[in-house]
Amino acid sequence: MIFIKNLKVFNCSISESFHWSKLPKLKEKMSEEKFIFNSYADLHSADLSYADLSYANLGYANLSSADLSSADLRSANLRSADLRSADLRSADLGYANLSYANLSYADLHSANLSYADLHYANLGYAKLKPIDDKEVIIKDFMSVCGLGSYNRQTLIFDTNIGIVLQCGCFYGTEKAFKEQVKETHKGTNYEKEYLEMLKLAHIRFQR
Protein backbone atom coordinates (compact mmCIF):
# COMPACT_ATOMS: atom_id res chain seq x y z
CA MET A 1 0.00 0.00 0.00
CA ILE A 2 1.33 3.48 -0.79
CA PHE A 3 0.32 6.62 1.09
CA ILE A 4 0.80 10.25 0.07
CA LYS A 5 -0.30 12.65 2.81
CA ASN A 6 -2.35 9.81 4.29
CA LEU A 7 -4.17 9.33 0.99
CA LYS A 8 -4.31 5.70 -0.09
CA VAL A 9 -3.20 5.49 -3.72
CA PHE A 10 -3.26 1.76 -4.35
CA ASN A 11 -2.68 -1.60 -2.71
CA CYS A 12 0.32 -3.82 -3.23
CA SER A 13 0.48 -7.34 -1.87
CA ILE A 14 2.03 -10.69 -2.79
CA SER A 15 -0.99 -11.56 -4.91
CA GLU A 16 -1.65 -8.10 -6.31
CA SER A 17 1.16 -6.23 -8.06
CA PHE A 18 1.26 -2.97 -9.96
CA HIS A 19 3.18 -1.57 -12.87
CA TRP A 20 4.98 1.73 -12.35
CA SER A 21 4.26 3.00 -15.83
CA LYS A 22 0.59 3.36 -14.90
CA LEU A 23 1.49 6.07 -12.38
CA PRO A 24 3.64 8.60 -14.28
CA LYS A 25 2.96 11.45 -11.87
CA LEU A 26 3.75 9.57 -8.67
CA LYS A 27 7.50 10.09 -9.01
CA GLU A 28 6.96 13.88 -8.92
CA LYS A 29 5.17 13.51 -5.61
CA MET A 30 7.95 11.35 -4.20
CA SER A 31 10.39 14.25 -4.02
CA GLU A 32 7.92 16.20 -1.89
CA GLU A 33 6.01 13.66 0.19
CA LYS A 34 6.85 10.69 2.39
CA PHE A 35 5.29 7.37 1.51
CA ILE A 36 5.38 3.75 2.60
CA PHE A 37 5.81 0.63 0.48
CA ASN A 38 4.69 -2.77 1.59
CA SER A 39 7.07 -5.64 1.04
CA TYR A 40 6.97 -7.58 -2.25
CA ALA A 41 6.32 -4.45 -4.33
CA ASP A 42 6.81 -5.02 -8.08
CA LEU A 43 8.99 -2.12 -9.23
CA HIS A 44 10.76 -3.78 -12.13
CA SER A 45 12.36 -1.11 -14.38
CA ALA A 46 10.84 1.71 -12.28
CA ASP A 47 12.35 5.19 -12.56
CA LEU A 48 13.14 6.02 -8.93
CA SER A 49 16.13 8.24 -9.58
CA TYR A 50 16.63 10.89 -6.86
CA ALA A 51 13.68 9.46 -4.90
CA ASP A 52 13.60 9.78 -1.11
CA LEU A 53 13.30 6.15 -0.03
CA SER A 54 15.01 6.51 3.33
CA TYR A 55 13.57 4.05 5.85
CA ALA A 56 11.26 2.61 3.18
CA ASN A 57 10.16 -1.00 3.53
CA LEU A 58 11.21 -2.67 0.27
CA GLY A 59 11.88 -6.12 1.61
CA TYR A 60 11.53 -8.79 -1.10
CA ALA A 61 10.65 -6.07 -3.64
CA ASN A 62 11.32 -6.61 -7.34
CA LEU A 63 13.63 -3.73 -8.24
CA SER A 64 15.42 -5.48 -11.06
CA SER A 65 16.61 -3.05 -13.75
CA ALA A 66 15.16 -0.14 -11.74
CA ASP A 67 16.75 3.30 -11.98
CA LEU A 68 17.75 4.16 -8.40
CA SER A 69 20.56 6.52 -9.33
CA SER A 70 21.13 9.18 -6.66
CA ALA A 71 18.22 7.77 -4.62
CA ASP A 72 18.21 8.22 -0.84
CA LEU A 73 17.98 4.67 0.52
CA ARG A 74 19.49 5.32 3.93
CA SER A 75 18.29 2.77 6.49
CA ALA A 76 15.86 1.29 3.94
CA ASN A 77 14.79 -2.31 4.35
CA LEU A 78 15.94 -4.09 1.18
CA ARG A 79 16.23 -7.54 2.69
CA SER A 80 15.96 -10.20 -0.04
CA ALA A 81 15.16 -7.51 -2.63
CA ASP A 82 15.80 -8.29 -6.30
CA LEU A 83 18.18 -5.55 -7.45
CA ARG A 84 19.65 -7.36 -10.43
CA SER A 85 20.97 -4.91 -13.03
CA ALA A 86 19.63 -1.98 -11.00
CA ASP A 87 21.20 1.43 -11.56
CA LEU A 88 22.45 2.47 -8.12
CA ARG A 89 25.00 5.05 -9.23
CA SER A 90 25.56 7.61 -6.47
CA ALA A 91 22.72 6.09 -4.41
CA ASP A 92 22.99 6.48 -0.64
CA LEU A 93 22.67 3.02 0.92
CA GLY A 94 24.16 3.94 4.26
CA TYR A 95 22.87 1.63 7.02
CA ALA A 96 20.46 -0.04 4.57
CA ASN A 97 19.48 -3.65 5.17
CA LEU A 98 20.70 -5.48 2.07
CA SER A 99 20.95 -8.91 3.65
CA TYR A 100 20.12 -11.67 1.16
CA ALA A 101 19.57 -9.03 -1.57
CA ASN A 102 20.48 -9.91 -5.15
CA LEU A 103 22.70 -7.11 -6.49
CA SER A 104 24.24 -9.10 -9.31
CA TYR A 105 25.09 -6.95 -12.36
CA ALA A 106 23.97 -3.81 -10.48
CA ASP A 107 25.81 -0.53 -11.13
CA LEU A 108 27.24 0.65 -7.79
CA HIS A 109 29.39 3.42 -9.25
CA SER A 110 29.96 5.92 -6.40
CA ALA A 111 27.20 4.35 -4.27
CA ASN A 112 27.52 4.86 -0.52
CA LEU A 113 27.50 1.46 1.20
CA SER A 114 28.73 2.68 4.59
CA TYR A 115 27.52 0.34 7.32
CA ALA A 116 25.05 -1.37 5.00
CA ASP A 117 24.11 -4.88 6.10
CA LEU A 118 25.39 -7.08 3.26
CA HIS A 119 25.07 -10.45 4.97
CA TYR A 120 24.53 -13.13 2.30
CA ALA A 121 24.03 -10.46 -0.39
CA ASN A 122 24.93 -11.40 -3.96
CA LEU A 123 27.19 -8.77 -5.54
CA GLY A 124 28.46 -10.97 -8.34
CA TYR A 125 29.35 -8.96 -11.48
CA ALA A 126 28.18 -5.72 -9.89
CA LYS A 127 30.15 -2.69 -11.08
CA LEU A 128 32.07 -0.21 -8.95
CA LYS A 129 33.53 3.18 -9.82
CA PRO A 130 36.27 2.78 -12.48
CA ILE A 131 39.90 3.06 -11.35
CA ASP A 132 42.43 4.55 -13.76
CA ASP A 133 39.77 4.31 -16.49
CA LYS A 134 39.51 0.55 -15.90
CA GLU A 135 36.11 -1.03 -15.35
CA VAL A 136 35.83 -2.60 -11.89
CA ILE A 137 33.62 -5.69 -11.65
CA ILE A 138 33.03 -7.52 -8.36
CA LYS A 139 33.77 -11.23 -8.07
CA ASP A 140 33.47 -11.54 -4.29
CA PHE A 141 33.57 -9.30 -1.22
CA MET A 142 34.01 -9.21 2.53
CA SER A 143 33.21 -6.64 5.20
CA VAL A 144 35.28 -5.82 8.30
CA CYS A 145 34.12 -3.52 11.11
CA GLY A 146 35.84 -2.04 14.14
CA LEU A 147 39.35 -1.51 12.80
CA GLY A 148 41.35 1.69 12.52
CA SER A 149 41.25 4.94 14.45
CA TYR A 150 37.52 5.49 13.77
CA ASN A 151 36.31 1.86 14.03
CA ARG A 152 34.98 2.18 10.49
CA GLN A 153 33.51 -0.48 8.28
CA THR A 154 35.89 -1.51 5.51
CA LEU A 155 34.50 -3.16 2.39
CA ILE A 156 37.00 -5.33 0.54
CA PHE A 157 36.18 -6.46 -2.99
CA ASP A 158 37.79 -9.15 -5.09
CA THR A 159 37.54 -7.73 -8.62
CA ASN A 160 38.76 -8.18 -12.16
CA ILE A 161 41.64 -5.75 -11.42
CA GLY A 162 42.56 -7.21 -8.04
CA ILE A 163 41.58 -6.27 -4.50
CA VAL A 164 39.72 -2.95 -4.17
CA LEU A 165 38.81 -1.33 -0.86
CA GLN A 166 36.27 1.22 0.35
CA CYS A 167 37.00 2.64 3.80
CA GLY A 168 35.61 6.01 4.84
CA CYS A 169 36.43 8.43 2.04
CA PHE A 170 39.09 6.08 0.63
CA TYR A 171 38.31 4.06 -2.49
CA GLY A 172 41.05 2.39 -4.47
CA THR A 173 43.37 -0.56 -5.05
CA GLU A 174 45.16 -2.62 -2.44
CA LYS A 175 48.44 -0.94 -3.37
CA ALA A 176 46.98 2.54 -2.92
CA PHE A 177 45.40 1.49 0.38
CA LYS A 178 48.72 0.23 1.74
CA GLU A 179 50.39 3.50 0.77
CA GLN A 180 47.63 5.49 2.50
CA VAL A 181 47.85 3.35 5.65
CA LYS A 182 51.62 3.73 5.87
CA GLU A 183 51.37 7.47 5.33
CA THR A 184 48.66 7.94 7.97
CA HIS A 185 49.36 5.21 10.55
CA LYS A 186 53.02 4.22 10.14
CA GLY A 187 54.40 2.52 13.27
CA THR A 188 51.02 2.30 15.05
CA ASN A 189 48.69 -0.56 15.91
CA TYR A 190 46.28 0.78 13.27
CA GLU A 191 48.85 0.05 10.58
CA LYS A 192 49.21 -3.50 11.90
CA GLU A 193 45.43 -3.98 12.00
CA TYR A 194 44.92 -2.88 8.41
CA LEU A 195 47.83 -4.95 7.08
CA GLU A 196 46.59 -8.05 8.92
CA MET A 197 43.14 -7.38 7.47
CA LEU A 198 44.63 -7.50 3.98
CA LYS A 199 46.26 -10.84 4.78
CA LEU A 200 42.84 -12.16 5.79
CA ALA A 201 41.38 -10.87 2.52
CA HIS A 202 44.02 -12.79 0.57
CA ILE A 203 43.04 -15.95 2.42
CA ARG A 204 39.33 -15.28 1.82
CA PHE A 205 39.81 -14.66 -1.89
CA GLN A 206 42.49 -17.36 -2.24
CA ARG A 207 44.98 -14.90 -3.72
Image (spheres, rainbow, N blue to C red):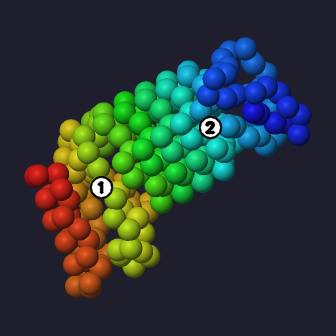
Name the image quarter holding residue 124. Answer: top left
Q: Residue at x 59, y 32 (%)?
A: 40
Q: Nearer the viewer, mark 2 or mark 1?
A: 2
Percent across and percent down for residue 91 are 55, 42
Percent across and percent down for residue 204 are 18, 56
- Inter-mark Cα distance, 2 to 1: 27 Å
From the viewer's side, name the closer residue of 177 and 40: 40
Amino acid carrying mark 2 in the image? Ser
Q: Residue at x 35, y 40 (%)?
A: 123
Left or right of 4, for residue 62: left
Percent across and percent down for residue 63 are 54, 29
Q: Secondary structure at mark 2?
A: loop
From the viewer's side, name the closer residue of 45 and 40: 40
**Residue holding disc 1:** 142
Residue 170 makes an appearance in the image:
yes
Name the image quarter holding residue 121. Answer: top left
Left or right of 188, for residue 121: right
**Residue holding disc 2:** 39
Left or right of 24, for residue 123: left
Q: Secondary structure at mark 1?
A: strand
Residue 133 makes an appearance in the image:
no
Dot 2: few (<14), some (14–19), or many (≥20) neighbours within 10 Å?
many
Q: Tell which residue pokes out farthest to the bottom in this image.
A: 188
User: Which quadrant is the N terminus positioned in?
Assistant: top right
Q: Residue at x 58, y 47 (%)?
A: 77
Amino acid carrying mark 1 in the image? Met
